[in-house]
């Protein structure tokens, strides 16, 4: 005597899992984009002097140079001004203002919440 099992729906199950992963990755990407926009606003508020760090606006070039882009599940914040690293890390003549790192530290929970909300909406 033998017993035979036939499992139905393997193809459909694989498609369901693959579709779910695509939706999840899209949700993560959307949440990361939203979290990046939030952090950009926080960095700009810091540069304007609306947070704990010393104001760093003179011509507005640094303030207007803050950019965010996402790739490979990362949000990358940057400034292309030649003096942004001096403002962030300081020099022998000026104290570090840490607009980027302090804003990121203050915003971690909020950014996790933003990403989590987008995943839940999935």
Image (cartoon, helix red, strand yellow):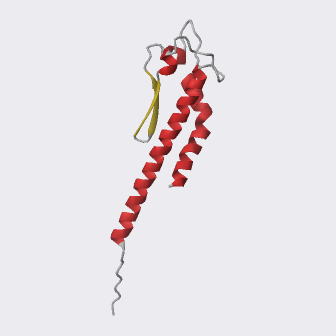
When asked about the image quadrant of residue 22, the answer is: bottom left
* Residue 116, above or below 76: below
Instruction: Give residue 100's position: percent from left, percent from top.
Output: 54, 25
| Residue at the top extreme, as displayed | 93
Image-based side of 101 in relation to 2, left or right: right
Q: Nearer the viewer, residue 25 or 44?
A: 44
Identify the residue at horizontal 56%, vertical 26% (top origin).
43
When asked about the image quadrant of residue 71, the answer is: top left
Identify the residue at horizontal 60%, vertical 19% (top origin).
48
Instruction: Give residue 116's position: percent from left, percent from top.
Output: 55, 48
Instruction: Give residue 51's position: percent from left, percent from top.
Output: 65, 24
Identify the residue at horizontal 49%, vertical 21% (top origin).
64
When asked about the image quadrant of residue 10, the answer is: bottom left
* Residue 40, above or below 29: above
| Total labels drawn | 0
Quarter holding the N terminus is bottom left
Identify the residue at horizontal 43%, vertical 59% (top origin).
20
* Residue 13, above or below 70: below
Q: Nearer the viewer, residue 59 or 27?
A: 59
Image-based side of 119 in relation to 51, left or right: left
Image-based side of 98 in relation to 13, left or right: right
| Residue at the right extreme, as displayed | 52
* Residue 86, above or below 27: above
Instruction: Give residue 26's position: percent from left, percent from top.
Output: 43, 49
């Amino acid at each position: 005597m033998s017993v035979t099992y036939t499992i139905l729906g393997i193809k459909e199950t694989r498609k369901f899992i693959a579709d779910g992963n695509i939706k999840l990755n899209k949700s993560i990407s959307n949440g990361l984009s939203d979290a990046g926009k939030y952090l950009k606003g926080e960095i700009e508020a810091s540069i304007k002097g609306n947070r704990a760090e010393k104001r760093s606006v003179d011509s507005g070039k640094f303030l207007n140079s803050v950019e965010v882009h996402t790739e490979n599940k990362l949000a990358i914040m940057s400034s292309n001004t030649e003096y942004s690293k001096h403002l962030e890390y300081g020099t022998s003549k000026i104290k570090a203002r840490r607009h980027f790192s302090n804003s990121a530290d203050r915003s971690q929970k909020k950014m996790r919440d933003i990403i989590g909300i987008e995943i839940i909406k999935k």
